[in-house]
Amino acid sequence: MARDLRAFIQVLEQRGQLRRITALVDPDLEIAEISNRMLQAGGPGLLFENVKGSSFPVAINLMGTEERVCWAMNMEHPQELETLGKKLGMLQQPKPPKKISQAVEFGKILFDVVKAKPGRDFFPACQQVVVEGDALDLNKLPLIRPYPGDAGKIITLGLVITKDCETGTPNVGVYRLQLQSRTTMSVHWLSVRGGARHLRKAAQNGKKLEIAIALGVDPLIIMAAATPIPVDLSEWLFAGLYGGSGVQLAKCKTLDLQIPADSEFVLEGTITPGEVLPDGPFGDHMGYYGGVEDSPVIHFHCMTHRQNPVYLTTFSGRPPKEEAMMAIALNRIYTPILRQQVSEIVDFFLPMEALSYKAAIISIDKAYPGQARRAALAFWSALPQFTYTKFVIVVDKDINIRDPRQVVWAISSKVDPTRDVFILPNTPFDSLDFASEKIGLGGRMGIDATTKIPPETEHEWGEPLESDADVAARVDRRWVEYGLDDLELGEVNPNLFGYDMR
């Protein structure tokens, strides 16, 4: 299994999913433009070996397809992610086993937790080279600027590591950082995030906040850090559960923080509470430039790295982007946990084109009137990450929620807008959503696209059209006789039906 960035790059290369580029490229706009074209086409990961202004190579688009995200998590198929979700769901809300087989299954999960406990590396690869004092210059890193309207160079896939100054509990998040000077960066995080909470706690205690940025880590750890599942486990333990064995950690050179021992780079610094600088604008996942916000300033005093390190990066924007591919994988992990929270849900899907969380499609096993509305309301409150979902579409269990043609048919044939659409106004909302009339406050819509039953409707619902079973079986038997067995009747190109999908 790949347990560091280099091993994952090797996996991609062995499977024909990596291109090495030796031509000189500019980290200012050019790398992102090349990568964006690959993302649009589902192309391979890229390793730029000759980057203008830096001696370090740049890896990007490594998780640019759902398949490669699965590989990063030591899996081959997206369905395997649901098995992981079941494991996490049992840890979140354990139930007393009623059968011996259930007790054995839960025992295996507890054993997985034991195996997932982090280890300690006293001679970590990430500290093979130490850069301190006047020698530290963040401009030597090949930081990219993705869009022409961006305020500056950024770090996007760094693990931002802090800890509570009272309890010592660590937090590992993935936040955007903007280069401000040769030794400073601003960090952009929401006030509800762990790092922001730790900064407030440090301010209350009159202390600086220690902060480390681990760059070029095992992509599996990035997935663990990006998983906002409400389980009382650390991100390190999550990563161990994801990977099947504990993450090797090491202590920072100058801080009392732990970082992945096989990181390519580690930046060590502090934040003085109250010190801020303007951060932004930058292109974000909504497909627009965000605003300018005063954000905390990190003063870095030490950088360590491996010999011949590789810099890993990505960028946000209108899908498809790497973050969207990661969200699709997380969707699979959430599914069993969501079923545990809302029992009538059979499946759910967060379409990439809906920015991975703005619209959700839910299928239910409908048993009583009003159940679709109940399921939508339950979805919004089931997990914190669904708070900002604008649209919830509920369909019957026989609808393939990952086929937009079936979903559009269900909406068109089963929805009366007066009866089946309900809106919740003035709810807390994503500050990046410019569609809202008031930033941070917006409405959300539920759509009941299920088959209606009394008293939802006062007339008889139509019978769905189906083939005669006997005739269908006869046609199956005679298919070769018709001389049609050479035709491929599997997945259909939607462009044949008037779509323009490229």
Image (cartoon, helix red, strand yellow):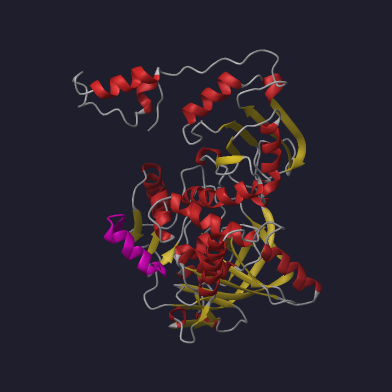
Relative to 41, does residue 468 appear above or below in the rendering?
above
Residue in front for this viewpoint, 17 or 462: 462
- Total tally of numbered discs in the picture: 0
Q: Which of 26 and 198 is in front in this view?
A: 198
Q: Quadrant of residue 443?
A: top right
In this view, the residue farthest toward the right is 204
Q: Position of residue 348 (x, y in %)?
A: 56, 41
Q: Quadrant of the image for the C terminus?
A: top left
Quarter holding the N terminus is bottom left
* Residue 394 in sight in this render: yes
Query: Going 61% across and 75% down the picture, which residue do you hit?
Result: 269
Q: Which of 254 and 394 is in front in this view?
A: 394
**Is 501 located above or below residue 9 in the figure?**
above
Horizontal side of 234 relative to 216 (left or right) equals: right
**Residue 9 falls inside the magenta stretch:** yes
Q: Does the magenta stretch include residue 344?
A: no
- Please identify the quarter of the rendering in which residue 180 is found: bottom right
Q: Residue at x 68, y 60 (%)?
A: 193
Q: Give the range drawn in magenta.
A: 2-21
